[in-house]
Image (cartoon, helix red, strand yellow):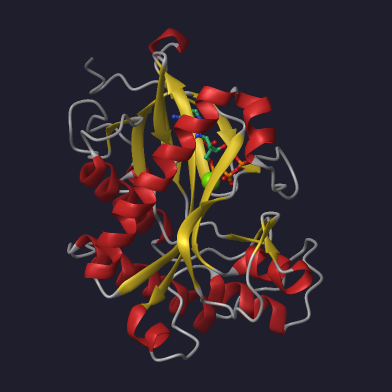
């Protein structure tokens, strides 16, 4: 397909972070996913943007699709805006933040894998000593590594918050074979990702995947192992028993909570120091894990 000089784009969905364009005719089933610099926290999109964020996320997913390539089907056609498929006519503001992908029939679940006790799992544990309904030993603190990573799926809410669901509920929604397959794929990708992260001196505490059907096959879609979709910690600091530096949205969530915000729009406006610190952490973790330089 040659789109140079003939790129028809139609905006079909505006997500919290990404703008999705249909490329060409519907039957081509090609989408352009453009990652903006928007940032959401507690399911609310902030008023201010994080400089370069869309480019960093795109570079990170591109790295992982390449790294995982061959092992699992995925939706990526190309993330290189100078390649023929995307063409030189790509609007300047889309460059470096776009991925041409195959349109998938998305599964209505989020496939979360947790290697460490954190986030909503920690909150649940503190209330009921369970994680995703599973009873754990008493006295665990945040940052504890689970003996085995846990698959803790949730619904993919059209609006509002996602709800945790059991494996059985996930099976009811997508079919048992599909649920078992995405559980297996999620745990395997997590394992590969966590091991690469470890080599880079960071811990992949947890992450979220989205899968969809492309030509009858289950493929990894959306973004993969990015600081927006994962919790990533400084390994040495975790080992030393301190609160590890978080290379993800946690510093933003912490700052928002410190303001006493009720988590309903409008959000408080983000000071420059908060935005730049988040940006620099995203760049740092991208560079460490990928071994590539962020060129902006
Ligand atoms: N290959 C694909 N085909 C179709 N849809 C996809 C594909 N990959 C990802 N998506 C969907 O595109 C959207 C990406 O946008 P974004 O990340 O901004 O959304 P979000 O904030 O996570 O959720 P929402 O879209 O509900 O606001 C998600 O809804 C995701 O499920
Ligand atoms: Mg998303």
Q: Nearer the viewer, residue 3 or 186?
A: 186
Residue furthest top in the image: 27
Q: Which residue sits at x=22%, y=43%?
A: 66
Please tell me whether residue 111 is drawn above or below residue 147 in the rendered image.
above
* Residue 264 makes an appearance in the image: yes
Q: Which residue sits at x=57%, y=74%?
A: 252
Q: Would you identify the image quadrant in which residue 41 lies?
A: bottom right
Q: Residue 220: give x, y in percent of width and height.
A: 40, 35
Q: Is residue 265 left or right of residue 206?
A: right
Q: Residue 69: give x, y in percent of width and height.
A: 23, 37
Q: Is residue 45 left or right of residue 114?
A: right
Q: Residue 3: give x, y in percent of width and height.
A: 26, 20
Please tell me whether residue 23 is drawn above or below residue 91 in the rendered image.
above
Q: Identify the image quadrant of the N terminus.
A: top left
Q: Identify the image quadrant of the C terminus.
A: bottom left
Q: Nearer the viewer, residue 200 or 103?
A: 200
* Residue 228 makes an appearance in the image: no
Q: Which residue sits at x=17%, y=64%?
A: 291
Q: Residue 98: give x, y in percent of width and height.
A: 35, 41
Q: Nearer the viewer, residue 242 or 95?
A: 242
Q: Which residue sits at x=33%, y=60%?
A: 194
């Amino acid at each position: 397909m040659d789109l140079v000089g003939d790129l028809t784009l139609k905006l079909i969905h505006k997500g919290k972070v990404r703008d999705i364009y249909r490329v060409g005719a519907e039957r081509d089933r090609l989408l352009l996913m453009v990652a903006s610099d928007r940032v959401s926290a507690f399911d609310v999109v902030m008023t201010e943007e994080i400089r370069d964020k869309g480019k960093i996320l795109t570079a990170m997913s591109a790295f992982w699709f390449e790294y995982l390539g061959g092992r699992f089907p995925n939706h990526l056609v190309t993330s290189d805006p100078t390649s023929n498929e995307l063409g030189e006519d790509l609007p300047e503001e889309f460059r470096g933040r776009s991925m041409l992908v195959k349109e998938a029939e998305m599964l209505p679940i989020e496939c979360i894998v947790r290697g460490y006790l954190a986030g909503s799992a920690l909150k649940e544990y503190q209330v009921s000593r369970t994680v995703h309904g599973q009873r754990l030993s008493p006295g665990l603190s945040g940052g504890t590594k689970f003996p085995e990573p846990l698959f803790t799926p949730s619904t993919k809410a059209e609006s509002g918050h996602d709800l945790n669901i059991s494996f059985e509920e996930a099976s009811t929604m997508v079919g048992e074979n599909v649920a078992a397959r995405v559980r297996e794929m999620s745990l395997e990708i997590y394992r590969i990702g966590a091991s690469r992260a470890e080599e880079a001196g960071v811990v992949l505490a947890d992450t979220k995947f989205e899968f969809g059907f492309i030509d009858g096959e289950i493929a990894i879609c959306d973004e993969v192992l990015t600081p927006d979709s994962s919790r990533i910690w400084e390994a040495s600091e975790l080992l030393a028993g301190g609160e590890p530096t978080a290379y993800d949205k946690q510093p933003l969530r912490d700052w928002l909570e410190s303001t006493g915000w009720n988590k309903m729009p409008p959000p408080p406006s983000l000071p420059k120091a908060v935005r730049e610190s988040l940006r620099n952490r995203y760049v740092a973790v991208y560079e460490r894990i990928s071994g590539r330089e962020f060129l902006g």
